[in-house]
Amino acid sequence: MDKLDNNWLTQGLIDFEYKKYVLLAYFKTVKESFNKVQLYPFLSDLVFHYRNLQTLKENKSLLREAFPKELSTEGIKNLEINYKKIIEDDDVMNELESIMDFAMPKFKSSLDEGSYIYEYVESQCEIAPIGLTSLYKNEGYLFVAQPPENETNIYRYQMTLYDQSHHTMRSIQTHHVMAVERSLVNTYENIKKGLIKQFTELPNPCTYLVTSRLKFPYQQTLMPVAKRLLVKEIAKE
């Protein structure tokens, strides 16, 4: 199973053994991915599902609202969109409680494993500015390199700030610009100068280099970690 539906808990058959089968197949896939040091998309997926279960456990009314709804016969006859809830009895709610009690420690265990791998990958990476940094840091370039390749991938990044629960959150979008080979002549500083000449709308861009000491799966692991390092670096400054 490659993906667990966002509404897996209330979707389809509400049966402990069936949901257990679905979950075990999902966690097997997650384990196989983590064994290859491939963190994404499963790490963010685990965070979503675990937090969702915590919220549902704390607020049972949300659990009832999470159920899909079906058109009532009366509503169809009247050509009105009226909804009838699929569940109304405590037996179903008790079954859901059992499913959640089984699922939560499984999600927590997988999430802990993924977080451990993430922290290790991050510990093997370094981030540093290239040249002088600009006061405007919400847009610029990100260089990502890892051995043994000589090739460095260059991305243009854009940071967005938004408020959530009285906290300022940051999201980042990246666009791949090019891949270049560093050399004694083609240094990172010279590559940056070339970008400034080519893309004149950013005359003094902040530019950061993320270097990994080890080779990791690029799209599934290194790139997400590099983006997170960039967000933390800019927030720190």
Image: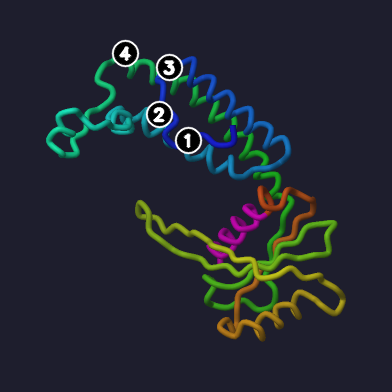
On screen, 63 above or below 188? Answer: above
Measured as percent of width and height from the top left, residue 28 is found at 63, 27
Q: Amino acid at mark 4?
A: Asp
Distance (Cα) linking label 3 and label 2: 11 Å
Q: Which kind of residue does numbered mark 1 sit on?
A: Asp
- Residue labelled with disc 4: 91
Disc 1 + disc 2, Cβ < 8 Å: yes
Q: Does dot 1 land on a helix, a strand or a loop?
A: loop
Q: Is residue 15 left or right of residue 151?
A: left
Q: Main secondary structure of the magenta part?
A: helix
Task: Mark 4 vs mark 2: give the one in front.
Answer: 2
Answer with mark 3 or mark 4, whichever residue precedes in sequence: 3
Q: Which mark is residue 5?
A: 1
Question: What label does residue 15 carry, if any?
Answer: 3
Which residue is pictured at 58% across the width and 40% down the height? 42
Closer to the camera, 99 or 120?
99
Task: Check if residue 234 falls in the magenta segment.
Answer: yes
Q: Position of residue 136 (x, y in %)?
A: 52, 76
